[in-house]
């Protein structure tokens, strides 16, 4: 039976040029209750990141067009994605490979072949750590000034409704069901609002909505 009781519809981006591994890992993670989107290389992953913000990235190292090292560097350089937990899943298992992967920006380095249970444990651990850091950063921000956004930010009626629901702690999937639209549509609205406000993530959007008494 599918176990999604404690995954909170977390979205994972899986990047690998091996279709067999993609299928295997995707099926296993989806069985565990995660939503999984896939890309065949770093360049395709960056295109996905333009429109979607996964909760974690799981990535091979050696890939055509753009390898994992180049991808993690791009992810860390972009303020919209720099906070996302990043795991390397690679056949390169020498100590120098692990050191390079972690020094380049990855949070976790797992070597193929791997046990599926260990993969899930590492994913859960990384997501919990990211959540703790986000709470800590939010607490620190709350101690300081309010969220700053450009003056005269105008939201459409739908965007306003979406950000109000974000402030209530609802996930994109739940908001989509409530508004009777696709999850991709909600992700697009969130992305548009992040661009309008220059905020970094959904948490800051929610804080802004609360502080501005929109929620």
Image (cartoon, grey):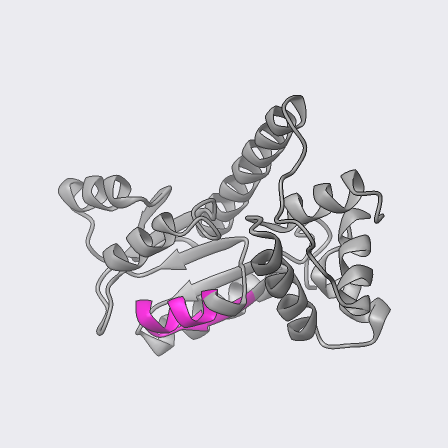
Q: Which percent across, then down, holds residue 142?
A: 67, 27
- Residue 120 in the magenta stretch? The answer is no
Quadrant position of residue 194: bottom right
Residue occupying the point 37% across, 54% down: 75
Q: Which residues are magenta?
A: 36-49
- Residue drawn at x 22%, y 43% is 98
Residue at the extreme front of the image, as rendered: 152
Q: Decide: is 45 above or below 96.
A: below
Q: Residue at x 71, y 62 (%)?
A: 172
**Height in image: 56 above or below 15?**
above
Quarter placement of the N terminus: bottom right
Q: Residue at x 14, y 42 (%)?
A: 96
Q: Position of residue 66 (x, y in %)?
A: 24, 68
> Is residue 34 at least partly visible in the picture?
yes
Front in this rendered view, residue 76 or 128? 76
Depth order, front residue of 111/143? 143
Q: Which of the two residues, 93 or 153, is positioned nearer the viewer here?
A: 153
* In the foreground, 41 or 195: 195
Q: Residue furthest top?
A: 143
Left or right: where does residue 100 sit relative to residue 22?
left
- Name the side, left or right, on which 157 lies relative to 12: right
Indicate left or right for 13 with 92 as reference.
right
Residue 97, image x, y percentages: 17, 46
Q: Is residue 47 magenta?
A: yes
Percent across and percent down for residue 43 are 32, 71
**What is the number of callouts on the image?**
0
Direction from residue 64 to residue 34 in the image, left or right: right
Q: Is residue 31 visible?
A: no
């Amino acid at each position: 039976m599918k176990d999604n009781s404690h995954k909170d519809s977390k979205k994972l981006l899986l990047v690998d040029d091996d279709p067999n591994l993609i299928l295997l890992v995707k099926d296993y993670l989806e069985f565990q209750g995660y939503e999984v989107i896939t890309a065949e290389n770093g360049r395709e992953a960056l295109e996905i990141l333009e429109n979607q913000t996964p909760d974690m990235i799981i990535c091979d190292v050696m890939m055509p067009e753009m390898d994992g090292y180049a991808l993690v560097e791009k992810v860390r350089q972009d303020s919209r994605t720099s906070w996302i937990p990043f795991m390397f899943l690679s056949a390169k298992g020498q100590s120098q490979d692990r050191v390079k992967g972690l020094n380049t920006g990855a949070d976790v380095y797992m070597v193929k072949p791997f046990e599926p249970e260990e993969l899930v444990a590492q994913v859960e651990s990384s997501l919990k750590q990211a959540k703790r850091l986000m709470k800590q950063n939010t607490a620190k921000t709350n101690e300081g000034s309010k969220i700053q956004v450009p003056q005269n930010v105008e939201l459409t009626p739908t965007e306003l409704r979406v950000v109000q629901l974000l402030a209530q702690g609802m996930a994109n999937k739940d908001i989509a069901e409530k508004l009777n639209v696709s999850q991709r549509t909600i992700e697009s609205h969130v992305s548009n609002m992040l661009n309008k406000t220059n905020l970094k993530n959904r948490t800051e959007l929610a804080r802004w909505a609360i502080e501005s008494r929109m929620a």
